[in-house]
């Protein structure tokens, strides 16, 4: 009988032995990823979205996993029924997981207060809330591996299968969270679903333990664990998480800032680990040279990760387009089609390296786990790998990427992976000469590719960089910021890209709505505004417009990214706001600025990214508006940018409902064809035409607004749409966006030409502006200006519909009445 034939009964026995534990770990992994997604989202509200803060918070989660693996693995070695310990862990995770979710939802204000009074010690709060349940989660894998009653020589195979099952559950948890749970049940409801999964796993373990014989506690050591493999796999964990940091900044330009895109990337990352581990688990015990194969896998992963970035090109965009077209041709909706685009990018950039890294785990178990203390050794593998990952995330995010850039950081990681492989084949036992030479060749090839790949490789692949020039590019902590010059001659303009995605620019439409965003609320303010806060610097145009209002004494801007401030001089129309001493730029998350600073303002105006982008919904929720309202002076105004093409009609209704739930006095203005402006207050907003005209006629104000086609107070007031009554009709029965129910972030994909539905629905709400002290001449001018603006909007809607004849007819009628208006002229290329 051949050895392969003889091994089949043993393999079947191992499969039978690991089936129930694998199912339990699948359920456990699913719950763990749901919690992780929820807590990362909640941590951004508690500690802020600055890269230092959120990375520190996430590290608490991973540190808990590492410590739990180490502690409970050792404890399991002393138990004859480790499955009972597993069941207890799952029950405790269910209780503490829900408790942590509820506590985090209320922790933002206490944390801000503690940080002001006790400094760094305040971090004990999020560390405990996230770290304690994570510590319990970390114990599940080593405890279940310890419960297996199998030959110690088969631990690599069995452990690899359990790791694969746990990772498969994590994939399911990732996709369920993004596509189903949070959208359906909200944050707290999703935590309850995860807790039910924990309890299901606990019940399954208790039922299984009743017919499972006690696992003997052995003290005979037949195999010695190789500590070198443990150390090398820990470093490999740092490299693997380093890849993830680099990928998160480099892949976005081929994806989207939507949560769905990040979920697909994470699921692909985990899928690579799952398939690689499952594949190797079936073969690990038959491999005669585990050190050589381990070295090849780690070194190969580094080279492939680097090559995939070095070879990126337009071919990927074409492949994505074909995948999306295929899904749509099969009857799929917009979201499945876009998800196909995301999956293609993730498969081409992320999948293969993680496949190789996943295959290394069963080998690491075989080399690192002895037969005497299985739980301890498996826990050590998990703990060291996780701790290495924490170090890798921090080094890459805080040091290497700002210092070396994305491409060079990836090159360094590939070289480190080659060094890990070399150490494995150099110091390991029984390594074949050919494999040792292959690992050396992979390392040298990684070094060559790292040196030859241009540093600006990713910059040249920016969507807007094609047929344009790159004016600014900086790969910094947490994000890549670029400025691209587009257009020709007098029509040229700058466009700001963050994480490879276009945010805004200084073309005429952007210039117009951002100046209106700042100056309109100041002009209609019922008091004498002295202070203003802008959340989101962007191009600096909104902040610069504040400099044109003479009465302001204190102008504050909260901006997250230093690179955005550095790029500001490239944009026209911002009056050098970044360097003007009259603007106080604070590098902080805008929500945290309001939470931690009791300063009150006469105006708070927001220019964040669109609400559908991941994490940005924090600045559009009812909870945020409640916080902002507490920071308004008497008669203070909050002005919220409302983009129209970036979400569906029903989602715009939810955004308006959130605003109305907080501000009893709310108005709507049309700042530009593609954008509107919500202005709210806790006190009545009186539109005194005389006062508004006097403020408008201040030379700096009239000049700034005249440049964007608003040459009088009447023209400005012509942008009025409706009051609270009209907004109530628009919002209807829509549910609000809240921190617990961030529905916009998980909304369906935006329908094609959605602005053609949203804009008419909002313009249908128009009512006459309730003016005070307006003479008949002013009223006639206002009506004429509003009629002209509406005709321009009709022309633009014709353009969206592809009706060039109707567009030409209406735009000519507009220009016949106002031929000198720079805003209208911009759209016809003048």
Image: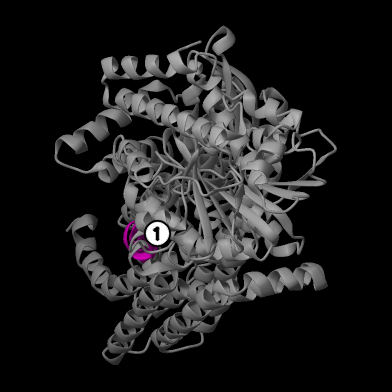
Q: At which x and y percent is residue 787? A: 42, 30
Q: Is residue 773 magenta?
A: no
Residue at the spot 39% in from the left edge and 62% down from the top edge: 170
159 w.r.t. 403: above or below:
below
- In percent of width and height, residue 818 lies at 49, 18
Q: Is residue 755 left or right of residue 70?
A: left
Nearest the eye: 683 or 242: 683
In front of the other: 265 or 38: 38
At x 79%, y 38%, the residue is: 550
Horizontal and vertical percent position of residue 725: 42, 58
Would residue 477 be visible to someone looking at this image? no
Farthest-out residue, top: 489
Query: Disc 1 on helix, strand or loop?
Result: helix
Q: Residues within 10 Å of mark 1 (few under 14, many from 20)?
A: some
Magenta segment: 162-182
Q: Position of residue 31 (x, y in %)?
A: 39, 70
Q: Quadrant of the N terminus?
A: bottom left
Q: Is residue 789 visible?
A: yes
- Residue in the image at 28% along x and 69% along y: 14
Q: Which residue is nearer to you in this view: 15 or 202?
A: 202
Question: What is the residue that sits farthest to the front in this orientation?
Answer: 776
């Amino acid at each position: 009988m051949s050895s392969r034939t003889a091994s089949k009964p043993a393999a079947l026995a191992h499969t039978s032995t690991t089936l129930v534990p694998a199912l339990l770990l699948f359920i456990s992994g699913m719950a763990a990823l749901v919690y992780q997604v929820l807590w990362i989202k909640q941590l951004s509200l508690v500690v802020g979205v600055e890269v230092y803060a959120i990375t520190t918070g996430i590290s608490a989660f991973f540190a808990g996993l590492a410590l739990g693996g180490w502690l409970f693995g050792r404890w399991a070695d002393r138990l004859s029924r480790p499955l009972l310990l597993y069941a207890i862990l799952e029950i405790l995770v269910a209780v503490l997981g829900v408790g942590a979710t509820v506590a985090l939802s209320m922790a933002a204000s206490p944390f801000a207060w503690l940080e002001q009074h006790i400094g760094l010690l305040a971090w004990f709060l999020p560390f405990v809330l996230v770290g304690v349940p994570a510590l319990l989660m970390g114990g599940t894998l080593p405890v279940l591996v310890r419960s297996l009653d199998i030959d110690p020589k088969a631990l690599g195979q069995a452990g690899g299968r359990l790791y694969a099952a746990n990772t498969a559950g994590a994939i399911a948890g990732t996709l369920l969270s993004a596509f189903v749970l949070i959208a359906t049940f909200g944050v707290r409801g999703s935590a309850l679903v995860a807790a039910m999964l924990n309890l299901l796993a606990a019940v399954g373990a208790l039922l299984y333990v009743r017919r499972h014989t006690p696992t003997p506690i052995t003290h005979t050591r037949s195999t010695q664990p190789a500590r070198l493999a443990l150390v090398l796999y820990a470093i490999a964990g740092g490299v693997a998480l380093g890849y993830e940091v680099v990928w998160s900044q480099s892949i976005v330009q081929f994806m989207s800032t939507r949560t769905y895109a990040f979920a697909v990337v994470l699921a692909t990352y985990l899928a690579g680990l799952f398939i690689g581990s499952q594949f190797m688990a079936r073969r690990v015990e038959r491999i005669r040279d585990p050190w050589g194969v381990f070295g090849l896998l780690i070194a190969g992963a580094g080279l492939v990760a680097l090559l995939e970035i070095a070879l990126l090109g337009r071919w990927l965009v074409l492949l994505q387009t074909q995948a999306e077209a295929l899904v749509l041709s099969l009857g799929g909706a917009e979201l499945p089609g876009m998800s196909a685009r995301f999956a293609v990018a993730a498969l081409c950039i992320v999948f293969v390296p993680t496949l190789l890294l996943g295959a290394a785990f069963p080998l690491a178990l075989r080399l690192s786990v002895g037969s005497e203390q299985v739980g301890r050794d498996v826990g050590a593998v998990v703990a060291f790998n996780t701790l290495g990952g924490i170090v890798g995330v921090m080094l890459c995010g805080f040091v290497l990427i700002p210092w070396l850039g994305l491409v060079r950081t990836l090159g360094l990681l590939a070289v480190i992976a080659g060094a890990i492989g070399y150490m494995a084949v150099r110091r390991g036992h029984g390594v074949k000469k050919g494999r040792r030479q292959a690992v050396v060749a992979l390392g040298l090839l990684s070094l060559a590719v790292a040196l030859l790949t241009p540093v600006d490789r990713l910059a040249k692949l920016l969507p807007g960089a094609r047929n344009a020039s790159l004016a600014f590019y900086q790969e910094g902590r947490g994000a890549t910021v670029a400025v691209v010059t587009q257009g020709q001659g007098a029509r040229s303009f700058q466009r700001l890209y963050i994480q490879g995605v276009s945010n805004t620019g200084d073309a005429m439409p952007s210039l117009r709505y951002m100046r209106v965003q700042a100056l309109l609320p100041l002009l209609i303010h019922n008091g004498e505004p002295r202070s203003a806060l802008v959340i989101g610097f962007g191009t600096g145009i909104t902040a610069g417009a504040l400099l044109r209002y003479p009465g302001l004494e204190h102008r504050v801007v909260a901006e997250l990214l230093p690179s955005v401030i550095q790029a500001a001089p490239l944009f026209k129309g911002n009056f050098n706001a970044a360097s003007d001493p009259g603007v106080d730029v604070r590098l902080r998350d805008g929500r945290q600025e309001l939470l931690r600073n009791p300063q009150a303002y006469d105006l708070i105006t927001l220019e964040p990214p669109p609400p559908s982008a991941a994490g940005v919904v924090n600045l559009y929720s009812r909870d945020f508006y409640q916080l902002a309202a507490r920071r308004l002076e008497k008669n203070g105004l909050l002005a919220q940018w409302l983009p129209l093409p970036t979400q569906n009609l029903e989602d715009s209704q939810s955004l308006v409902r959130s605003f109305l739930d907080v501000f009893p006095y709310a108005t709507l203005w049309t700042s530009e064809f593609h954008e509107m402006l919500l202005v709210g207050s806790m006190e009545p907003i009186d539109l005194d035409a005389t006062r508004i005209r006097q403020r408008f006629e201040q030379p700096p104000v009239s000049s700034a607004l005249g440049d964007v086609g608003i040459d009088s107070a009447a023209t400005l007031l012509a942008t009025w749409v409706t009051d609270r009554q009209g907004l109530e009709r628009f919002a209807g029965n829509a549910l609000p966006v809240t921190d617990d129910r961030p529905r916009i972030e998980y909304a369906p994909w935006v329908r094609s030409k959605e602005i053609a539905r949203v804009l008419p629905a909002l313009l249908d709400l128009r009512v006459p502006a309730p003016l005070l002290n307006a003479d008949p001449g002013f009223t006639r001018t206002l009506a004429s200006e509003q009629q002209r603006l509406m005709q321009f909007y009709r022309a633009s809607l014709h353009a969206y519909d592809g009706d060039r004849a109707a567009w030409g007819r209406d735009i000519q009628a507009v220009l016949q009445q106002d031929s000198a208006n720079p805003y209208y002229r911009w759209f016809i290329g003048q």
